[in-house]
Image (cartoon, rainbow, N blue to C red):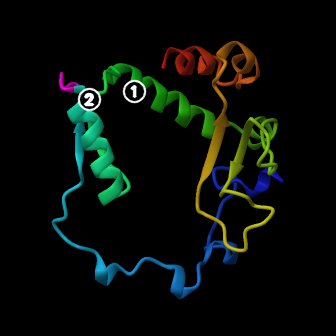
């Protein structure tokens, strides 16, 4: 089943299982240009204001941008690099973690639930449960070799 992974297969055309009916596609004509994304500054000393800003953003938009989250840019870059390296592994290596079972705690898959969906989402993902760390880290990928170290640092 790992051949279903988008990061493994080569597609000359869009597979039909990824084509949404017109009624489910974004209506780009209705997109508001110049709209502002809510911004939440986690570095603010006013905790109540931060909590209120998160609540407001979730109610009004359903998402927000975070500033001053405290994660160093070098670590973000390292996580992105090891993630790219993972998804560039050979199909055989990635197949070791592939599963279409949504109940698996650690798995590589595509879309949300390929067993039940009639139309898939165009993505691959690696699901890693993290709590408690001692229970799950041993089962995280060992390839690329620095994967566990970099992700655990995060």
The residue sitting at 65% across, 58% down in the picture is 111
Q: Which mark is residue 42?
A: 2
In this picture, is 112 found above or below 71?
A: below
Q: How crowded is mark 2: few (under 14 residues within 10 Å), some or many (20 or more)?
A: some
**Which is nearer the N-term, disc 1 or disc 2?**
2
> Disc 1 vs disc 2: Cβ atoms closer than 8 Å?
no
Using the rendered view, name the quadrant where residue 132 is placed. Answer: top right
Using the rendered view, name the quadrant where residue 126 is placed. Answer: top right
> Where are the magenta residues, as a range?
42-46
Q: Which mark is residue 95?
A: none
Q: How crowded is mark 1: few (under 14 residues within 10 Å), some or many (20 or more)?
A: few
Which circle, 1 or 2, is nearer the viewer?
2
In this picture, is 59 found above or below 34?
A: above
Q: Is the magenta stretch mostly helix, strand or loop?
A: loop
User: Quick one: quadrant of the N terminus?
Assistant: bottom right
Residue that numbered label 1 is attached to: 76
| Number of numbered discs on residues | 2
């Amino acid at each position: 089943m790992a051949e279903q992974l988008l990061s493994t297969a080569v597609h000359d055309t869009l597979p039909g299982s990824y084509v949404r009916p017109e009624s489910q596609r974004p209506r780009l004509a209705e997109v508001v240009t110049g709209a502002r994304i809510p911004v939440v500054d986690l570095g603010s000393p006013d905790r109540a204001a931060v909590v209120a800003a998160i609540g407001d953003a979730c109610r009004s938009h359903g998402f927000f941008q975070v500033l001053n989250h405290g994660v160093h840019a070098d670590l973000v870059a390292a996580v992105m690099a090891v993630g790219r390296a993972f998804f560039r592994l050979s199909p055989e290596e990635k197949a070791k973690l592939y599963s279409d079972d949504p109940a698996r705690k650690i798995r590589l898959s595509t879309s949300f639930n390929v067993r039940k969906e009639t139309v898939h989402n165009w993505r691959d993902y690696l699901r890693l449960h993290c709590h408690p760390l001692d229970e799950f880290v041993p089962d995280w990928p060992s390839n690329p070799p620095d994967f566990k170290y970099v992700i655990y640092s995060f």
